Amino acid sequence: MPAQSDKSRPIIYMRPHIRKEFTSNPNKTVWVTDLKRAIREGNPKARDGADIRTTSIQNAVRQMRMEGFPLEIVEYGNAWKYMPNGVSPEVQKPAASEAEPQPAKPVSAPPAPKTLFEYLAVRRDGSLLLEDENGQLYSATPLHP
């Protein structure tokens, strides 16, 4: 039997069922399996064997958290706790993996010393003979001959 295409898959509105499950269990851990069961029980389309994807539930919960619904992450992607009195600020922030990825900060080299060198000669071994502004002599080897 061919797999159902996305167009023939029934649309299941999850968020009302998810919200109801959380609000009926304040300060208790609610697992993704509990949310699947609540969606399946509350939606006739879901009872008819429609696939309820875990990632869809996780995305709905993430959106609810971003909109300010007071949820504490108990186990990332699997369990949450509804906190009707609010979530402490450090818990309310999305986990690093949930937040938008931040661009990497460019790594800059330490500032180069302000010493100037004067080229004096090429030595027999191919290195350069240099003199700094204080008269100190240096031997420098080219990195790429």
Image (cartoon, rainbow, N blue to C red):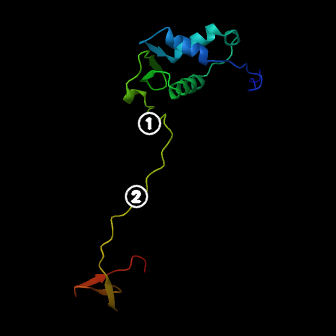
- At a point 38% along the width and 28% down the height, the residue shown is 89
Mark 1 residue type: Ala
Viewer-closest of 121 and 117 = 117
Q: Quadrant of residue 140?
A: bottom left
* Percent coordinates x, y for residue 130 in the rendering: 30, 86
- Circle 2 SS class: loop
Disc with the residue nearer the chain's start (1 vs 2)? 1
Q: Is residue 75 left or right of residue 51?
A: left
Res. 76 in view? yes
Viewer-closest of 6 and 114 = 114
Q: Is residue 124 left or right of residue 3?
A: left
Q: In which quarter of the image is residue 42?
A: top right
- Circle 1 SS class: loop
Cα separation, mark 1 vs mark 2, equals: 21 Å
- At a point 48% along the width and 22% down the height, the residue shown is 78
Q: Is residue 67 above or below residue 33?
A: below
- At a point 41% along the width and 16% down the height, the residue shown is 85
Give me the disc on residue 19. Answer: none
Q: In this view, does 23 lie above or below 111?
A: above
| Image quadrant occupied by the C terminus | bottom left
- Residue highlighted by disc 1: 96
* Percent coordinates x, y for residue 99 in the rendering: 48, 36
Res. 122 in view? no
Rate crowding at label 2 as few (under 14), some (14 to 19) or many (20 or more) other CA atoms within 10 Å: few
* Percent coordinates x, y for residue 66 in the rendering: 52, 29
| Image quadrant occupied by the N terminus | top right
* Percent coordinates x, y for residue 141 in the rendering: 34, 80
Rate crowding at label 1 as few (under 14), some (14 to 19) or many (20 or more) other CA atoms within 10 Å: few
Q: Is residue 76 left or right of residue 140?
A: right
Mark 2 residue type: Val
- Residue highlighted by disc 2: 107
